[in-house]
Image: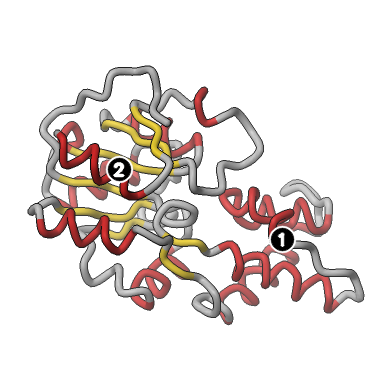
Amino acid sequence: MESSRPAQAAEIRTVLFDLDGTLVDSAPDLAGATNEMLVARGLPALPLEFLRPMVGAGARGMMGLAFQVAPQDPRFGALRAEFFDRYELRLLQETQVFAGVPELLDALSHAGLAWGIVTNKSERFALPLTAGLGLAVRAAAVVGGDSTPHTKPHPAPLLEAARRAGVAPEHCVYVGDDHRDILAGRAAGMFTVAVSWGYLGQGEAIEDWGADLIVDTPAQLLAWLQAQ
């Protein structure tokens, strides 16, 4: 499906991607870390599909679903630290690149288009994850949630990625599976693409995010890019 907004962009030179839910399916490992915590406390594990929509919200979303704690809860800090430690130990146990993404990235490189990654995942996880999946060595930039003083939806991480890639923001496309991705991309002056195969969260419908384009598969995104 495509948005009703006209799919018009400045000359595209670089495609920037969100990581979790856009390039890679990290839900099994994030849910696995959460379920390890539940089982360690004698509680039943939760189904992956129950946890999956909240992956984009990170520790806040996962701990909220599993333990009904919000960030302001005094228990949250310790739970988050344990979650991070457990996740780090299983970072690449089940995480995989989404089907169709390798072909998309290969086609971009073949066409002479640079691509990079901008994620709210901290560098502690983003750097070894992208390295382990063979993404970091090919990316023009890998910007994590603590690479700049701000996280998405602030445009700073996207602008930093454009700087590292040596391209003006108006010549970038930002692709993501969360409303924050679209807000960040628009604020950075980039063309924005929302992908429906991601986690999407539990907020506004993807059609209401204000993306310039909505695509259902990596192949659809590639076809659009090739038509520009």
How far apart are the two marked residues, 2 and 1, measured between alpha carbons?
39 Å
Q: Residues within 10 Å of mark 2 (few under 14, many from 20)?
A: some
Residue with the most extreme right position: 42
Could you say whether the residue bearing mark 2 is in a helix, strand or loop? helix
Q: Observer-nearest residue: 37 or 74?
A: 37
Q: Is residue 184 left or right of residue 90?
A: left
Q: Residue at horizontal 65%, vertical 57%?
A: 59
35 in relation to 170, above or below: below
Residue type at mark 1: give it. Gly
What residue is disc 1 on? Answer: 77
| For residue 188, above or below residue 63 | above
Number of marks drawn: 2
Q: 10 Å neighbourhood of mark 1: few (<14), some, or many (≥20)?
A: some
Vertical side of 11 occupied by 109: above or below = below
Q: Position of residue 77 (x, y in %)?
A: 72, 60
Residue 91 vertical position relative to residue 163 in the rendered view, above or below: below
First-in-chain label (2 vs 1)? 1
Closer to the observer: label 2 or label 1?
2
Q: Which mark is residue 221?
A: 2
